[in-house]
Amino acid sequence: MFEDGAKCAECHSTDAGPNGEPALLTDFTYDNIGVPANPENPWYQQDAFNPDGRDWIDPGLGGFLATDLVYAPYAPAQIGKQKVPTLRNVDARHSPVTAKSYMHNGFFKTLEGVVRFYNTRDVWPRCAPDLRTEAQALANKCWPAPEVAQNVNTDELGNLELTPADEAALVAYLKTLTDE
């Protein structure tokens, strides 16, 4: 399922390294998967450094490219794109009760939520504006709007048609990627 049905390997490659090294589970590209803004992000309260407050968005790779005259023409097509992370040690934590956060801004607190988002992002309706956390979205079967609406990948996620059992199997698999 990781390779085919859920399309995970499209970005989280399972190919071995050039000398037979274990897969890094990333293709080293950048992608905007439509992650919502994280209302709990402490950056929003850093007035001295973030004058935009809650209106600030992370422009990702496009924001970086826009700062360089040579690469600025390529910036618009890259706005909102974040580096595809490795999935190695995706569930690693100091103890079983230590909190985790996922995605570039920490919106997701559970692997279950991440997998559900990949599966239903384009199926569930948009949440009401007051429903902004992962827990609220899951409880109401809706997703907040993307933090950055441009350049959202609609080819490899959003409506994977996975069953709840498929989602649970993917989460179980992801947890096996943690080193001893």
Image (cartoon, grey):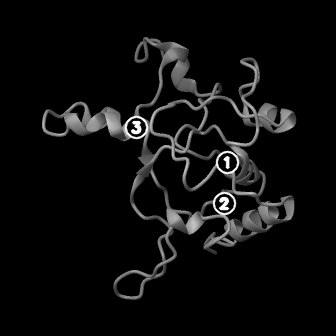
Q: What residue is rendered at 64% in x and 25% in y?
A: 39
Residue 168 in the figure: left or right of residue 46:
right
Residue 128 on image: x %, y %: 76, 21
Q: Are marks 2 and 1 in contact (CB under 8 Å)?
A: yes
Point out the tag, 1 or 3, that comes first from the N-terminus.
Answer: 3
Provide the residue designation for mark 3: 60
Provide the residue designation for mark 2: 91
Numbered disc 1: secondary structure: loop
What amino acid is found at the position of numbered circle 3 in the picture? Gly
Q: Quadrant of residue 94?
A: bottom right
Residue 88 appears in the rendering:
no
Provide the residue designation for mark 1: 100
| Residues at marks 2 and 1, CA–CA distance in whole angstroms | 8 Å
The furthest residue to the bottom: 20
Observer-side mark, 2 or 3, equals 3
Numbered disc 3: secondary structure: helix
Q: What residue is rendered at 55% in x and 68% in y?
A: 9
Point out the tag, 2 or 3, that comes first from the N-terminus.
Answer: 3
Compared with 56, 7 (above or below) is below
Image quadrant holding the N terminus, namely bottom right
